[in-house]
Image (cartoon, helix red, strand yellow):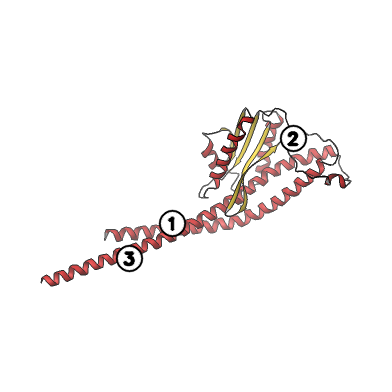
Amino acid sequence: MQALKEYTHRIKSLKNTRKITKTMKMVAATRLRHAQQAQEGARLYSARLSELMSRFLSAGEDLRDPFLEVRAASKRALVLVFTSDRGLCGSFNNQICKRVVSWIQEQGNRFERVDVSFCGRRGYNALKNRVKVRRNYEGVTNKPSYADARRISAELKEPFLAGRYDDIYLAYNQYQSPLVQKPVVEPFLPFEPRTAGDAGHEIPYLYEPGKKRLLALLLPKMLDFQVFHALLENAAGEQGARMTAMDNATNNADDMIERLTLLRNRARQAAITKEISEIVSGAEAM
């Protein structure tokens, strides 16, 4: 009877766990729909904005801006890593942390110093003893806002303009599907426009205000949106990974409940058979 009670207790515990994981899956799926819509819009807007900047910078004039300055001797680099504040999302945080560590090992010889900032508590807790930490931004990845993105972008641009860092990178999980999030490390500063070919020479643009003033207005906004885009990609990836992880946990709970139910039935059958055998033996003895 002890075995039957143990099986019953474990099955009851697994059913409660299954309720929790199923509910968390539904919550993550709802949040994923909103995050995915924002991420898709941001990705399209970012692509068009990058194309606009590429055409603008390749339109024939030699435009100069502090954010475009590529320094001959890059000695100090900063990497901003985006992770989640909460867990229960599979390997989502682990894969970007591993990518950052491998990137530092590969690119570390280029720089005298590589510092790391974090958006998200999980990445900070995982790497704080392995890298040189500059800053940790908490509470900005769960519900990304443009105001937070502007604040973070400003705190990245200031040390670059002051010369304390020569290169700045963004590291985040690029959302591709609920099952797949691709860890990427991409340059942030100095700004690198995408190649636009000769498209910028084919159309005679008219600029108002002048090109230099327009560049000074557009480029900081472009950098702010890059940080916001990374936050949205990270948020969509987090919800997709959590939905997948909770779905797997629910399926595993179902499998374990089925297996334990079978074992419990076998134990009950063995107990009944034993009792019948004892009754028959007693009757024969009498």
Mark 2 Cα within 10 Å, few/some/many (few <14, many 20+)?
some
> Dividing the image into 4 quarters, which one contains the N terminus?
bottom left
Which comes before the other along the chain, label 3 or label 1? 1
Q: Tell me the tag on residue 17.
A: 1
- Residue type at mark 1 is Thr
**Residue drawn at x 73%, y 49% as measured from the top left:** 47
- Residue type at mark 3 is Asn
Mark 3 Cα within 10 Å, few/some/many (few <14, many 20+)?
few
- Residue type at mark 2 is Phe
Q: Are marks 1 and 2 in contact (CB under 8 Å)?
A: no
Question: Quick one: SS at disc 3?
Answer: helix
Is residue 213 at all visible to an observer of this figure?
A: yes
| Residue 208 drawn at (x, y percent) | 87, 43
From mark 3 to mark 1, how far is it between C-alphas? 22 Å
Q: What residue is disc 2 on? A: 67
| Residue 55 drawn at (x, y percent) | 81, 44
**Residue drawn at x 58%, y 58% as measured from the top left:** 30
Q: Which quadrant of the view contains residue 138?
A: top right
Is residue 155 at all visible to an observer of this figure?
A: no
| Residue 156 drawn at (x, y percent) | 67, 35
Q: Tell me the tag on residue 82.
A: none
> Dividing the image into 4 quarters, which one contains the C terminus?
bottom left
As drawn, is 168 to the left or to the right of 124?
right
Q: Which quadrant of the view contains residue 73?
A: top right
From mark 1 to mark 2, how far is it between C-alphas? 51 Å
Which comes before the other along the chain, label 3 or label 2? 2
Q: Tell me the tag on residue 265.
A: 3
